[in-house]
Image (cartoon, rainbow, N blue to C red):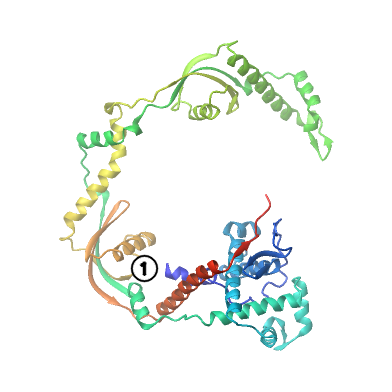
């Protein structure tokens, strides 16, 4: 988890710098229609700080650029929406605005000279290492940003940078010692793998009956109805040439292409199918009224969930109404006479089903029993040292299985034990332990502390400053 935090830290905490015009020529994105209740240009307001549409657009593009740089591929609008890039961008700007408010209330300010120096030192605005005013204006023009607006963005970033520098970001030696122990701890392991196929599972009738009694509700008769039923299959409808032509003439507005009516011969088969469906539906509607009013009788039968699950579900959805139900090119008209109670099946009739349902539980219990009986006598194979973040696999296990086993071992306090993983029991014994010295992990801990501090700071500031997020799409 800590490794993931390190790799994705830029998305978890506030981005301190504008990614100096890496968004050149990216263009402004189509954001859709929004309600800007506070002002025409503000997508959000935090305390006394407005967040403009341009700021949101640039932050959004900055995230896309970072993704492209990291992953080596671009995101289109649909993919970005799916990943929630827009929400990430607005949250980053809200976090920045919280810090801006705090900085201003703390008396911090950024001078014009500081803004000018930062812009002049931005390589994107330089020719041969020297700031070029015309280049600066042209790049901003391409991105539809006014110089004053961009300079205000830079001022905000510098202000955030200044207030952020006041936060302690380095973990103390004691904090590093405490937090690094689980990361740097290495166990020398001896393991043995037992497969479930090699473990005998004994199941008695008394165990099955006890399981059956506890789970009786799972062994009911299928839901069923006594009904009167009439059906019309679309394919059984007769359609002669005159019927099809008459239908075509009455519905010719449905057979056009760019305002030009398609000829009868061109789409004859389509018209024939449409006519048959229309005729079957009309017959079904007329029949449903007659069946409802008891002017006709349907075929009396019993339908069950086992025989026709879709029809049973459709009947339940429409309740007591009698109306055509279309399933697989057939219109069903069903009048429910009686809903049969779902009786619980006798044990003898479902014994095999109960056994199949109970078997996974019995097998797991047998695996646990086998593991416990071997735990203090197994010798196993010495597989060397493993840590919580080890990437190497355990022999005869894949990467995911190896990580799951290691995670379980490190979550337990016992010197030896077992892990059940699917159809395997992994017995283990910790032969030796050591603690690594790792500068990389120390840097992770520094970043982890920074993240925790910033998270706490944002929670505090969000209570102090009112947040209004206008980024809501019109429905």
- Name the image quarter holding residue 329: top right
* Residue to which mark 1 is pinned: 392
The secondary element bearing badge 1 is classed as loop
- Name the image quarter holding residue 355: top left
Q: Residue at x 33, y 76 (%)?
A: 178
Q: Where is residue 123 in the image (x, y as percent from the top left)?
A: 67, 83
Answer whether residue 141 is visible to the viewer in this image: yes
Q: Residue at x 75, y 72 (%)?
A: 145
Q: Which residue is drawn at 74% across and 28% down?
A: 271
Q: Where is residue 344 in the image (x, y as percent from the top left)?
A: 33, 27
Q: Position of residue 341 (x, y in %)?
A: 40, 23
Q: Quadrant of the N terminus?
A: bottom left
Picture layout, residue 321 above or below residue 142:
above
Picture layout, residue 115 above or below residue 194:
below
Circle 1 packing at 10 Å, graded few (<14), some (14-19), many (20+), is few
Task: Say which of 88 and 139 sits in front.
Answer: 88
Q: In this view, does 375 lie to the left or right of 293?
A: left
Q: In this view, does 418 lie to the left or right of 1?
A: left
- Name the image quarter holding residue 339: top left
Q: Which residue is drawn at 62% across and 62% down?
A: 468
Q: Where is residue 194 in the image (x, y as percent from the top left)?
A: 25, 55
């Amino acid at each position: 988890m800590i490794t993931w935090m390190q790799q994705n830290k830029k998305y978890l905490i506030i981005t301190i710098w504008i990614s100096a015009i890496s968004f050149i020529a990216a263009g402004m994105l189509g954001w859709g229609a929004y309600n800007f209740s506070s002002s025409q240009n503000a997508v959000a307001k935090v305390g006394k700080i407005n967040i403009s549409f341009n700021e949101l657009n640039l932050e959004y593009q900055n995230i896309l650029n970072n993704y492209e740089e990291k992953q080596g591929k671009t995101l289109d609008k649909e993919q970005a929406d799916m990943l929630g890039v827009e929400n990430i961008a607005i949250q980053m700007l809200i976090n920045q605005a919280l810090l801006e408010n705090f900085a201003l209330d703390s008396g911090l300010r950024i001078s014009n000279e500081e803004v000018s120096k930062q812009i002049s030192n931005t390589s994107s605005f330089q020719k041969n290492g020297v700031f070029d005013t015309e280049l600066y204006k042209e790049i901003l023009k391409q991105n539809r940003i006014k110089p004053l607006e961009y300079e205000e963005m830079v001022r905000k970033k510098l202000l955030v940078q200044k207030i952020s520098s006041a936060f302690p970001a380095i973990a103390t030696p004691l904090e590093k010692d405490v937090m690094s122990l689980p990361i740097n701890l290495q166990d020398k392991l001896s393991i043995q793998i037992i497969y479930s196929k090699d473990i005998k599972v004994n199941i008695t009738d008394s165990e099955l009956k006890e399981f059956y009694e506890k789970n009786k509700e799972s062994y009911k008769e299928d839901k069923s109805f006594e009904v009167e039923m009439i059906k019309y299959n679309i394919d059984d409808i007769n359609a002669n040439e005159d019927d099809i032509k008459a239908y075509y003439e009455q519905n010719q507005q449905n057979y056009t292409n760019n305002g030009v009516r398609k000829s009868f011969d061109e789409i004859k088969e389509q018209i024939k199918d449409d006519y048959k469906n229309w005729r079957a539906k009309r017959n079904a509607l007329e029949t449903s009224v007659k069946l409802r009013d008891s002017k006709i009788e349907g075929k009396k039968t019993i339908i069950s969930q086992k025989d026709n699950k879709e029809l049973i579900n459709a009947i339940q959805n429409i309740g007591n109404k009698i109306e055509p139900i279309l399933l697989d090119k057939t219109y069903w008209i069903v009048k429910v006479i009686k809903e049969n109670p779902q009786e619980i099946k006798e044990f003898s009739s479902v014994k095999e089903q109960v056994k199949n349902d109970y078997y996974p539980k019995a097998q797991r219990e047998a695996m646990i029993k086998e593991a416990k009986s071997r735990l203090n006598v197994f010798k196993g194979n010495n597989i060397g040292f493993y840590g919580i973040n080890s990437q190497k696999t355990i022999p005869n296990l894949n990467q995911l299985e190896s990580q799951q086993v290691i995670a379980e071992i490190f979550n337990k306090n016992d010197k030896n034990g077992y892990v059940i993983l699917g159809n395997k029991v992994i017995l283990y014994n910790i032969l030796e332990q050591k603690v690594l010295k790792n500068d990389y992990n120390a840097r992770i801990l520094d970043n982890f502390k920074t993240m925790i501090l910033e998270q706490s700071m944002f929670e505090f500031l969000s209570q102090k400053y009112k947040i209004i997020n206008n980024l809501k799409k019109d429905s």
